[in-house]
Amino acid sequence: MARHANQKQKLLVLLRVLWEQSDDEHPMTVGELLAALERQGLKGERKSIYTDMEALRAFGIDVVNRRGKGGGWYLGERTFQLAELKLLVDAVQSSRFLTQRKSGELIRKLAVGGAEALFVSAEWPLPRREHWVTLLRARAIENQMYVVACNRCGVTGQEVFGGNSLIVAPDGTVLAQAGAEEDIICADLDPDFVRQTRDRIQVFRDRVPSLY
């Protein structure tokens, strides 16, 4: 019974790892899959990985094995492709009829689904500039994704806008930040760093959506 339970847990871990860390451009080798299992306190063998992948296929999961140099295992068909996830995240973030709480949870669901970057456009006023920076860093950390945020600058009537557009890494590090005036900023976004961050600190694993 214990062995059976352990096998089911191993399959779930492998599925989650493939979902979060693999795609057709980033297949995972058997060694990487074994290392991921070991980090979860589970043991596996090279031969058993092939059996596990066949078991996932039997459940209807589109697990693909690319052979040859640079090959490995990855999830093929997904509910959303990366470009679709990015579009959905942008739409949720900019929606005017969603509350901040609901918007945040929808973005979290998209992050769980594989989204790696959040793009934000806003009109935050200058007096709330520090709130703008703090909340964007928090959003990057809680979803373990890049945040690329563009804020309006200049003056309209009595309203002074804060600028300070910025790019934040999944660990909350500010990679680039503009001043209060119009500017262009840039930074490299590394999808592998998103996967590494999510693998190292697995916050999504502990979500219990049924409680809220």
Image (tube, rainbow, N blue to C red):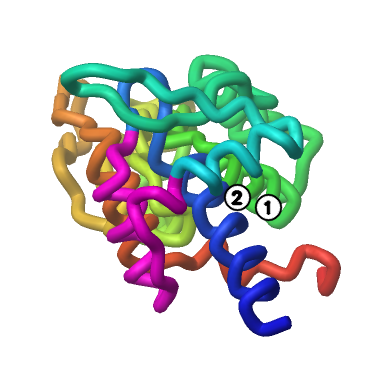
Q: Element type at marker 2?
A: helix
Q: Residue furthest bottom?
A: 2
User: Does 197 sit left or right of 50 as displayed?
Assistant: left
**Residue at figure coordinates x 39%, y 45% from the top left:** 145
Instruction: Out of 168 and 200, give the one closest to the viewer.
Output: 200
User: Which label is found at residue 105?
Assistant: 1
On-image quarter of the C terminus: bottom right
User: Which label is found at residue 204?
Assistant: none
Rendering coords of residue 183 (x, y %) = 17, 22
Could you tell me the amino acid type at mark 2?
Arg
On-image quarter of the N terminus: bottom right
Camera sees residue 197: yes
- Residue 97 against residue 208 in the figure, above or below: above
**Residue at figure coordinates x 15%, y 30% from the top left:** 187
**Residue at figure coordinates x 36%, y 59% from the top left:** 45
Would you say the residues marked 1 and 2 are in contact, meaning their CB atoms lie under 8 Å apart?
A: yes
- Residue 25 against residue 137 in the figure, above or below: above
Crowding at mark 2 (Cα within 10 Å: few <14, some 14-19, many 20+): many
Which region of the structure is painted magenta? 28-49
**Residue at figure coordinates x 75%, y 38% from the top left:** 59
User: Does 183 sit left or right of 10 as displayed?
Assistant: left
- Report how far apart the C-alphas of labels 1 and 2 lie in the structure: 5 Å
Instruction: Out of 30 and 119, give the one closest to the viewer.
Output: 30
Camera sees residue 129: no
Could you tell me the amino acid type at mark 1?
Glu
Residue under label 2 = 108
Crowding at mark 1 (Cα within 10 Å: few <14, some 14-19, many 20+): some
Rendering coords of residue 131 (x, y %) = 41, 59
